[in-house]
Image (cartoon, helix red, strand yellow):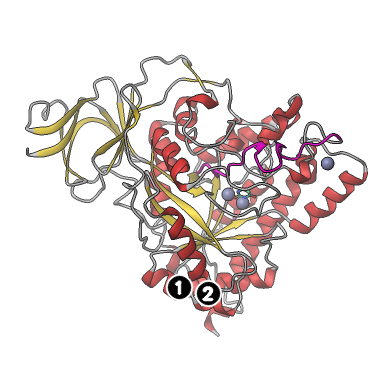
């Protein structure tokens, strides 16, 4: 055979353009792009006729929690690497970057990383990398940053401004940013003011306001905007060290991010489907349904949702990630639903784990929304994540001889919503989806990972294997010439001491 796989007659969409051409794949790479239909009769092991369909690069989801210990309230992760990545490929996602959690008790980042490797190794249906989740930025951890980038291919980390198990003080954040800058590590920030939300939670509980909707009262928009502003200020103090604000939900935070970007600061932002498709009214659904939409930050109102959509379209948000952070609402250990007892029949918001599943629904929801140009869809779900986290151009693109043959084929035969999303059609190990019953227009027909069809919606479903996913050693972020950014304002520059 001249080629392993050939895809003919499709309309190919990248972040840059939409055009009809054929794609030839050999030894896991895209090797040739040719005029549409011209490869229909070449000598290939497998020919896929994508007539009437769109071909996009595989989805890259750089915000995924799998098999983490309880840190976001009660409950432990319902998905393992195996079930989470199986769910990923069924939804068109071919690469993820998940978190390697370092707890407060663990001084070493390298140990935390090794423990995460052990969970993922041989258990992943898609390619995967890790961000360090830094819970204890002590001397030892900070001294390991160089080893992370030089030897481990781990070039990003996440820090938290909330959660008892993870919250860093401002001085600790500065220490992390300084060391991150020295080692060209890209820092993700969870920006919510933890002290304020704990205080508000106590106030609500004292008034016996326990139900899921009060989760959103405990985290008003200003608490996200304040922390976002503070994170941007801390970045500017360390000579404008690049940061990414994760899971942004609030217009005030969005405006502050946009302002910093307009000032030329290397401030990047992410939002997630829950802030585009859910609102705070979903937290007030009857029975336990509200609890299924509890995540942090909480979904906001309809007007905020529109501001977030605009931010995706105008480039304020570089990426749309899932923040797949799954918990079962049926808690096997307690023998009853998590957070439910006689006193709190619909759940006590303080105890509902903060997170929802979404690794499989991210691309279908966005592709089907009709609210993004297809090039923008590819940009925010695949190309930009790959660039931001040092995976480009082997991931997130279709460059012959360079890009891995990670592709998704979509057949939008109808413009009308014709698929009803139910949890029973998903491939995670979680017992609900917050999008139950929603009508969507499209679902990936094929997912191809390094030249291999790992998902065929109409013929066998998941065809991949849990041993096929590979660990991705990543380079430095390349979305911007961010590392050359210098603080020209002549102020005190701590990085020059
Ligand atoms: N932050 C996340 O990124 N995921 C789930 C919980 C949280 O607060
Ligand atoms: Zn977070
Ligand atoms: Zn998360
Ligand atoms: Zn109770």
Identified at 45% across, 34% down, the residue is 363
Q: Residue furthest bottom?
A: 497
Identified at 51% across, 79% down, the residue is 143
Q: Residue furthest right?
A: 207
Location of residue 325 in the rendering, given as x and y in whole percent from the top left corner: 58, 44
Q: Callout 1: 10 Å neighbours few (<14), some, many (20+)?
A: some
Q: Residue at label 2?
A: 179
Which mark is drawn over residue 201? none
Spatial CA distance of label 2 from label 1 is 6 Å
Does the segment drawn in magenta span residue 380?
A: no
Instruction: Label the magenta part by its dominant secondary structure.
Output: loop
The relative height of residue 96 versus residue 154 in the rendered view (above or below) is above
Check whether the beta carbons of the residues at disc 2 and disc 1 lie within 8 A of each other: yes
Per the image, label 1 sits on a secondary structure element best described as loop
The relative height of residue 167 versus residue 225 in the rendered view (above or below) is below
Identified at 56% across, 69% down, the residue is 177
Identified at 46% across, 47% down, the residue is 81
Which mark is drawn over residue 183? 1
Per the image, label 2 sits on a secondary structure element best described as helix
Does the segment drawn in magenta span residue 324?
A: yes
Location of residue 212 in the rendering, given as x and y in whole percent from the top left corner: 76, 36
Location of residue 237 in the rendering, given as x and y in whole percent from the top left corner: 61, 71
Can residue 238 be seen in the rendering of this structure?
Answer: no
Side (left or right) of 265 relative to 379:
right
Please tell me which residue lies in front, 460 or 481: 460
Can residue 305 be seen in the rendering of this structure?
Answer: yes
* Quadrant of the drawing holding the C terminus: bottom right
| Start-end of magenta stretch | 321-342
Side (left or right) of 9 relative to 484:
left
């Amino acid at each position: 055979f001249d080629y392993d796989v050939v895809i003919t007659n499709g309309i190919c969409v990248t972040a840059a353009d939409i055009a009809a051409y054929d794609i030839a794949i050999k030894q896991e790479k895209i090797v040739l792009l040719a005029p549409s239909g011209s490869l229909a009769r070449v000598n290939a092991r497998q020919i896929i006729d994508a007539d009437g369909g769109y071909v996009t690069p595989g989805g890259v989801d750089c915000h995924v929690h799998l098999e983490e210990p309880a840190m976001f309230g009660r409950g432990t992760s319902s998905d393992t690497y195996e079930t989470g990545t199986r769910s990923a490929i069924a939804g068109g996602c071919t690469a993820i970057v998940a978190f390697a959690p370092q707890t407060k008790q663990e001084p070493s980042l390298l140990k935390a990383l090794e423990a995460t490797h052990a969970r993922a190794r041989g258990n992943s249906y898609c390619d995967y990398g890790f961000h360090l989740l830094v819970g204890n930025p002590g001397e030892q951890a900070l001294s390991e940053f160089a080893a992370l980038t030089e030897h481990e291919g781990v070039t990003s980390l996440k820090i938290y401004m909330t959660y008892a198990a993870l919250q860093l003080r401002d001085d600790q954040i500065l220490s992390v940013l300084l060391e991150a800058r020295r080692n060209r590590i890209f820092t993700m920030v969870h920006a919510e003011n933890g002290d304020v939300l704990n205080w508000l939670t106590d106030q609500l509980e004292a008034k016996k306001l326990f139900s899921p909707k009060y989760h959103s009262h405990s985290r008003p928009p200003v608490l996200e905007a304040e922390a976002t502003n503070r994170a941007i200020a801390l970045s500017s103090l360390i000579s404008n060290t690049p940061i990414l604000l994760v899971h942004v939900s609030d217009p005030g935070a969005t405006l502050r991010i946009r302002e910093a970007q307009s000032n030329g600061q290397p401030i990047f932002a992410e939002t997630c489907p829950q802030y585009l498709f859910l609102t705070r009214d979903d937290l007030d659904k009857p029975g336990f349904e509200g609890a299924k939409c509890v995540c942090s930050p909480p979904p906001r109102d309809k007007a905020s949702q529109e501001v977030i959509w605009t931010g995706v379209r105008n480039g304020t948000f570089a990426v749309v990630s899932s923040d797949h952070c799954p918990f079962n609402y049926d808690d096997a250990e307690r023998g009853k639903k998590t957070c439910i007892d006689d006193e709190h029949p619909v759940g006590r918001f303080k105890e509902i784990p903060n997170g929802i599943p979404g690794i499989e629904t991210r691309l279908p929801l966005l592709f089907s929304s009709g609210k993004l140009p297809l090039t923008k869809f590819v940009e925010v779900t695949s190309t930009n994540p790959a660039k931001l986290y040092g995976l480009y151009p082997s991931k997130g693109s279709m460059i012959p001889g360079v890009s891995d043959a990670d592709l998704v084929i979509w057949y939008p035969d109808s413009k009308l919503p014709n698929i009803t999303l139910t949890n029973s059609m998903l491939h995670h190990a979680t017992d609900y989806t917050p999008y139950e019953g929603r009508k969507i227009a499209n679902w990936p027909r094929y997912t191809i990972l390094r030249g291999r069809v790992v998902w065929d919606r109409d013929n066998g479903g998941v065809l991949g294997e849990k041993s096929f996913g590979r660990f991705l050693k990543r380079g430095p972020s390349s979305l911007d010439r961010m590392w050359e950014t210098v603080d020209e304002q002549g102020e005190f520059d701590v990085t020059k001491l």
